Image (spheres, grey):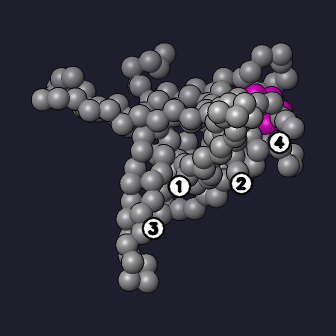
């Protein structure tokens, strides 16, 4: 069987503050727009600039983290997969392509030049939220629920803080 791949990596700035809502079952989901830019030199020698807008969707714990730490103008790295949706509206079929985020890294510092308001964090924060892992290798080892760490405010220091969200129970020291 041939393998396939659906992976997206983007670095861009948020076009608006993230909006978090909850599904009927209580699952948090956060959406935000992300702008990426491309520059090239035209045939006449002038620099051309183009901006693409992407809709990013983050679920569960990653959605909560995005809602708490991201604001309009922040520079972020997003990794995830493409998802296409369609729905009926006013008798017409509408389509939308979104990026379903699996990882997010904040790349700028608090109060960057593109930030319109105060940031909820004091320094750059790296968020590592690994994608869900597949079933265990052996059927005799049942899969355990993922365990996550709550992000904690980082003390002031000269390098970025790292918040790890680890879902592998075998890595725990007890």
**Main SS class of the magenta portion in the image:** loop
Closer to us: mark 1 or mark 3?
Answer: 1
Q: What is the secondary structure assignment of the residue under circle 1?
A: strand
Residue range highlighted in magenta: 121-125
Indicate yes or no whether the magenta region holds residue 122. yes
Cα–Cα span, label 2 and label 1: 16 Å
In terms of sequence position, does the residue under pointer 1 or pointer 3 come before the other? 3
**Residue 114: assigned label:** 4
- Residue 143 at x, y percent in the picture: 29, 32
Circles 1, 3 touching at the beta carbon (< 8 Å): no
Q: What is the secondary structure assignment of the residue under circle 3?
A: loop
Circles 2, 1 touching at the beta carbon (< 8 Å): no
Question: Which residue, given by chain and number where applicable, does mark 1 sit on?
Answer: 29
Question: Which residue, given by chain and number where applicable, does mark 2 sit on?
Answer: 16
- Residue 35 at x, y percent in the picture: 65, 45
Cα–Cα span, label 3 and label 2: 25 Å
Question: Residue drawn at (41%, 34%), measured in percent from left and top?
Answer: 7
Direction from residue 107 to residue 10 in the image, left or right = left
Q: What is the secondary structure assignment of the residue under circle 4?
A: loop
Cα–Cα span, label 4 and label 2: 11 Å
Q: Is residue 35 visible?
A: no
Closer to us: mark 1 or mark 4?
Answer: 4
């Amino acid at each position: 069987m041939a393998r396939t791949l659906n992976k997206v990596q983007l670095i861009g700035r948020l076009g608006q503050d993230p909006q978090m809502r909850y599904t009927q079952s209580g699952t948090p989901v956060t959406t935000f727009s992300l702008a990426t830019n491309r520059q090239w030199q035209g045939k006449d020698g002038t620099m051309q600039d183009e901006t693409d807008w992407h809709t990013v969707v983050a679920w569960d714990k990653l959605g909560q983290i995005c809602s708490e730490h991201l604001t309009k103008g922040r520079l972020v790295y997003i990794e995830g997969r493409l998802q296409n949706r369609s729905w009926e509206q006013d008798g017409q079929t509408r389509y939308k392509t979104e990026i379903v985020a699996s990882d997010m890294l904040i790349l700028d510092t608090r109060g960057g030049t593109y930030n319109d308001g105060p940031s909820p964090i004091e320094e750059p924060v790296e968020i590592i939220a690994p994608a869900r892992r597949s079933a265990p290798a052996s059927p005799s080892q049942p899969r355990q629920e993922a365990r996550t760490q709550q992000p904690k405010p980082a003390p002031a220091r000269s390098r970025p803080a790292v918040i790890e969200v680890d879902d592998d129970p075998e890595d725990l020291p007890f």
